[in-house]
Amino acid sequence: QVQLVEAGGGLVQAGGFLRLSCVLSGRTFSSHTMGWFRQAPGKERGFVAAIKWSGDSTYSAESVKGRFTISRDNAANTVYLQMNSLKPEDTAVYYCAAAPRVDTLVLMTLKAGLLNWGQGTQVTVSS
């Protein structure tokens, strides 16, 4: 079991940048795959990016490729989402999630109840 705490959201203008963080705690999480999801007002939850805790395998949604980068710092037990060239369409609550022993491509297909979730952090991008 893993506990997740997100931070780093805020209000920025289009073209700006933010870095979100997700701090993990728990007895073990070395076999977990981590991901970022987002949910805009009136919209369904959408996948953003995923990374394995071990190794360098990552996967990102087409809408954020070239702009968002997921990374991790194992020593700090933290996963990051660097968001550059932000657009108003990126406005959403961003959630960190984790699941044990799944590939990055699989994480986005899992039902919400099968994931461990953080509390979310608001990202607002103005025009």
Image (tube, rainbow, N blue to C red):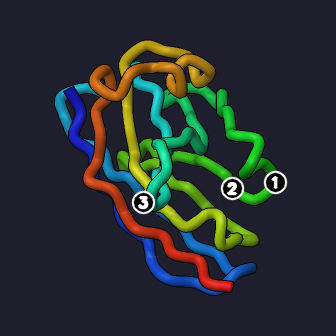
Q: Is 116 left, or right, of 72 in this rendering?
A: left
- Can you name the residue that lies furthest to the right here? 66
Residue type of the residue flagged with mark 2: Phe
Q: Amino acid at mark 3?
A: Val
- Residue for badge 1: 66
Q: Which residue is mark 3?
A: 93
Tell me the amino acid under the disc marked 1: Gly
Query: Quick check: 126 left or right of 123?
Result: right
Question: Residue at the location (19% across, 35% down)?
Answer: 26
Considering only vertical position in the picture, is 38 above or below 62? below
Name the residue carrying label 2: 68
Q: Secondary structure at mark 1?
A: loop
Residue depicted at x 45% and y 56%: 42
Query: Looking at the picture, how far across and down is residue 19, in whole percent?
Result: 54, 67
Q: Relative to 41, is 118 on the left or the right?
A: left
Spot occupied by residue 108 in the image (x, y as percentages of width and height): 53, 27
Q: Is 100 above or below relative to 52?
A: above
Label 2: state its secondary structure: strand
In this view, the mark in front (3 or 2): 3
**Mark 3 / mark 2, whichever is N-terminal:** 2
Q: At x 38% / y 21%, what residue is drawn?
A: 111
Characterize the local packing of mark 2: few (<14), some (14-19) or many (20 or more) Cα atoms within 10 angstroms: many
Q: Position of residue 40 (x, y in %)?
A: 49, 58
